[in-house]
Structures are given as C-alpha cells and as structure tokens.
Amino acid sequence: MTRVLVSRCRSGQPAGSISAARMLAFLPIALSILAAPALATSAREQAEVLVERGLALDDNSEAEADLYRKAIALDPSYASAHFNLGFVLQKLGRLEEALEAFRECVRRDPSRAEGYYNLGILTWAVRRDPVAARRALNRSIELREPGEDGEQALWEKARHSLAEMELEIFEQKRPDFAEWLSASEIVALLARPIRRAHARGGQTIYLGPRVPLLLFESDSAQIADDRWDQLDELGRALGHPALAGLSFVIEGHTDSRGSWESNQWLSRDRALAVRDALVRLRVEGAGAIEVRVLGEDDPAYPNDSQAHWRMNRRVEVVRADAVWPSEEGG
C-alpha cells in the first residue's frame, strides 16, 4: 500500500502543495534570504530564516536537511523545523530518522495535524505498530474536522489511510469470533503457543493466543445481562490446571465512534468491569489480572458497518508474557 506524506510547511501554516505562482512570487524573497546576512536577533527568528532557506532549496537534499538541523539547534521547540526535517529525511529514505523527527514535531506542537498524519503513516510503514499508527492518524482527524477551511483534503487522506490500515490488520489477524465459548474451548485457545508477527527493525507484534468476548452494548461498560454465563465459563477456564502458571491480561476495546479520549475511558471501564466480575465470581488471582487500555486503536475488524462495530466493542483475554506493539513502537 502506497501512501504519500503531507509536504513541507512554514511556521503556523497548514502543509500542502505550493503552486507555481506562489513559488514565483516567493523567489525574490528566497534569493534575498540566501544572499543577505542574518539580521534576526532572537533564536526563533534565526531559526525561521534557516527554515525559509531550506524551503527555498526545495530539493530534498542533505543541504536542505542541514538547514533544518541548524534551525533546531538554535530553537529545539520550533515544530516546523522538525516537520520539514522529517519530510526531507523520508524523501532520502532515512525512515527511522524521519519517524523521530515527526514524533518530535508533535511533541513540540500537539496541535499539528499534519505532523500526526505523517507520524501515523511512517509508524505503520516502518514499525508496523497498529496501535501507535492508528492513534496518530486518529489524532490528525480529530484536529482537522472536515468543515474547517483548507482541511478537507487532509481529513479525507487520514480517514482513507485509517481504512486501508484496518483492512491490512484484519487480513493479518483474521480474527475468529464466536458468540459463545465454553470453558474447555477457552482453555484450548489460551494454552496455544504464542504467535508473533515480525516487523521491520526487529519489532515483534503479538498475534495470539487471544480470546475475544462480546459482552457490551454500544457506548456502555455494563456487562449485558445475557452475557454473565459467558463470564462464568471464562472464570472456570482461568482456574483450569492446563493454564496453571500462566498470567493473563484483559484488554479493553471500542469501535471508532466517539472521540479518542472518551473511547480510552470506555475501554478502560470495560476491562475493569470484566476483572471485577471475575473477582465477584471468586476466580483465584482475578484481582491481580492486569488490564490494558486500547480504546479504538486496535480494531479487530474495519470500522465500516454495524456488524463490525459490534465486533470491535469487546474485551480480549491475552497472555501476559506477550510483547506489546505500543511498547516496542514507542
């Protein structure tokens, strides 16, 4: 899957393509910047001059990258310098360095939607970390609603990239959901050997074993009345001798509707509700089971239909001796 990063930008301006007319209008200014000595006094002003020199070069070269590095050395908080450095490094094929530059960009300016977009695209391309990539792309969407001037294109690109990524994840995981699992079926699933997917840079993504449980209605962390029998089966399974010595984590998940922040809280409450239920059912060691909050960041299915939304608002019981994508992807 080929995706295009959002291009360079100046301080405080949305990123995008620069028309030929604008480039011609900017040419005399660029030439004067290149020729004249730096008259700026503050570190930020000097850094802005260096960024303008880099934009005037516009050749994705080491020389252009060096100008952005010099700007960062003068003013490390200058998000636009980090953004433009990331763009050039990506063009030079230095993807890990580009990833770090975009990460620093959004750390310095958390309102930079195009920074989150590029961070998400590169996180998926380089690290194959679905949680961190989706989190960054979703943040870019929330920062740029489609009704805002000039933001429709970025919003649509981010939504399209999210949909493509969710489809890739689905094809990789091929989740197997069941409306009902007996205790013996849960034991058989959790006793399987751990499966991992190997990504670039030595990263490892946990694929299983995992037991997804559909226990909740939309926008609710209350266990549905007709799902308590399923929790009884889970409790019996966790106490089975075949799973003795193993530790487990309860992951909370949501679909993509609602804000990212509200879905984080909702998934947390769902995971805690299941753990608390296991405690009430007197499952040995239930109180020590860890919970992991994933919100909408790790969908099992593409968020494109009522049926798939239902599958995504779930909890999953996974092995605690796993390697988490978000830990490795940073």
Image: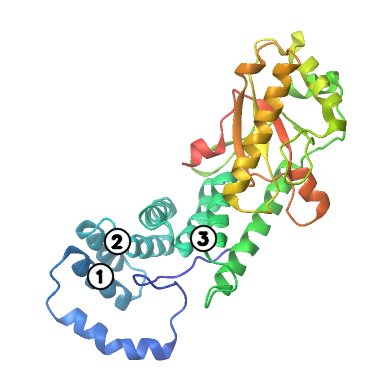
Residue 304 drawn above or below residue 127: below
Where the N terminus falls, by quadrant?
bottom right
SS under mark 2: loop
Q: Is residue 207 visible?
A: no
Residue 304, image x, y percentages: 76, 57
Q: Are marks 3 and 2 in contact (CB under 8 Å)?
A: no
Mark carried by residue 48: 1
Residue type at mark 2: give it.
Tyr
Disc 2 target residue: 78
Residue type at mark 3: give it.
Tyr
Residue type at mark 1: give it.
Glu
Q: Is residue 122 visible?
A: yes
Mark carried by residue 117: 3
Q: Are marks 1 and 2 in contact (CB under 8 Å)?
A: yes
Label 1 to label 2: alpha-carbon separation = 9 Å
Q: Badge 2, how many Cα within 10 Å: few under 14, some, many 20+?
A: many
N-terminal of the pair, mark 1 or mark 2, is 1
